[in-house]
Amino acid sequence: MPDIKSLKGKTIFMSGGSRGIGLAIAIRAAQDGANIVIAAKTSEPHPKLPGTIYTAAKEIEEAGGQVLPVICDVRDEANVQAAIDAAVEKFGGIDICVNNASAVSMTNTEHTTMKRYDLMNGVNARGTFMLSKLCLPYLKKSEHAHILNLSPPLDMVAKWFKSHTAYTMAKYGMSMCTLGMAAEFKDYGIGVNSLWPLTPIDTAAIRNILGGDEMAKMSRTVEILSDCAHMMLTKDPREFTGNFVVDEQFMRAEGITDFSKYAPGGDAMLAGDFFVPDAVFDDVPTKVMRGFGNE
């Protein structure tokens, strides 16, 4: 099965996606003419965050895709199954599962409530496992099946745990799904991969939780991840699986050399993101400030 150039006609089931990185990935796929299922909780406007599943649906339609917005809590099995059933009824199947929904709390052990711990692990690790599991019967029928997890490389060093153990456990839980399912689903021809940015991405989470406007200036735009995800999802899933992709490193290997359009801060120094191994920073020519999130 060769790589393809377009996602036209492919059905993508995405958790989250009402804003930010997930929405950008959906819009890029919609430009090809893909079918997008946005399964998220945000049906009413949030006081501090932009977008709902309905505003996202409008943007996706305007980009050229067909869309099904579904109110869905990825922690609830019946909720997820109902959303999948609705997707299959509308589009006839599922080709790609994108585990984008994520909960974050950058707190140490002492200051992490068990409610917050359960939320992060329920959305991130458990949600990724469950959505992948429940999509599996339809992915097995697809001729171009991918699972894409928005999760980091498994760099098992203490600096990524010491300040926010619970959050790291939850994100690494997503990555362990990649590691295990890539091997488990290989005979089905399903590609399972993770995607993570080299730098922070300018989203509401960065502006409201992780550093504000100053950190946003040291970040890249969501389009670097949507372009990178598109490159990944058009690859032959039988050959491209089990990879922990860091955006710039992967895109350079694919022949991309100019990343200036993804930097809203112009010549401002970029920050290095959480969880990026030192070897990746050493492998790319972009100069970034290392240490974000591990001090």
Image (cartoon, rainbow, N blue to C red):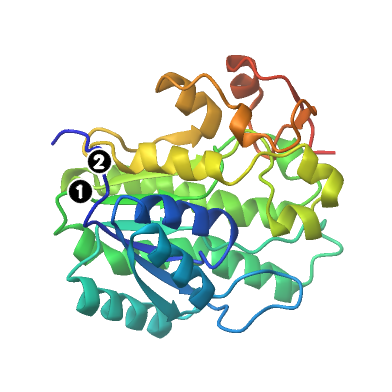
253 horizontally vs 143: left or right? right
Image spot of residue 102 (x, y percent): 59, 62
The disc placed on residue 5 is: none
Image spot of residue 195 (x, y percent): 49, 42
Q: Quadrant of the N terminus?
A: top left
Earlier along the polypeptide chain: callout 2 or callout 1? 1
Image spot of residue 132 (x, y percent): 36, 61
Q: Which residue is drawn at the image coordinates 73% and 45% (left, top)?
A: 161
**Callout 2: SS:** loop
Quarter location, residue 117: bottom right
Crowding at mark 1 (Cα within 10 Å: few <14, some 14-19, many 20+): many
- Residue 269's place in the image compared with 121, above or below, is above
Mark 2: amino acid: Pro
144 horizontally vs 230: left or right? left
Q: Which residue is drawn at the image coordinates 54% and 78% (left, top)?
A: 41
Quick check: marks 2 and 1 in contact, CB under 8 Å?
yes
Tag 1 residue: 144
Q: Nearer the viewer, residue 230 or 128?
A: 230
Mark 1: amino acid: His
Q: Nearer the viewer, residue 196 or 218?
A: 218
Quarter location, residue 61: bottom left
- Tell me if residue 212 can be seen: yes
Crowding at mark 2 (Cα within 10 Å: few <14, some 14-19, many 20+): many
Q: Quadrant of the C terminus?
A: top right
**Callout 1: SS:** loop
- Residue reaching furthest to the front: 62
Image spot of residue 159 (x, y percent): 76, 37
The disc placed on residue 237 is: 2
271 horizontally vs 45: left or right? right
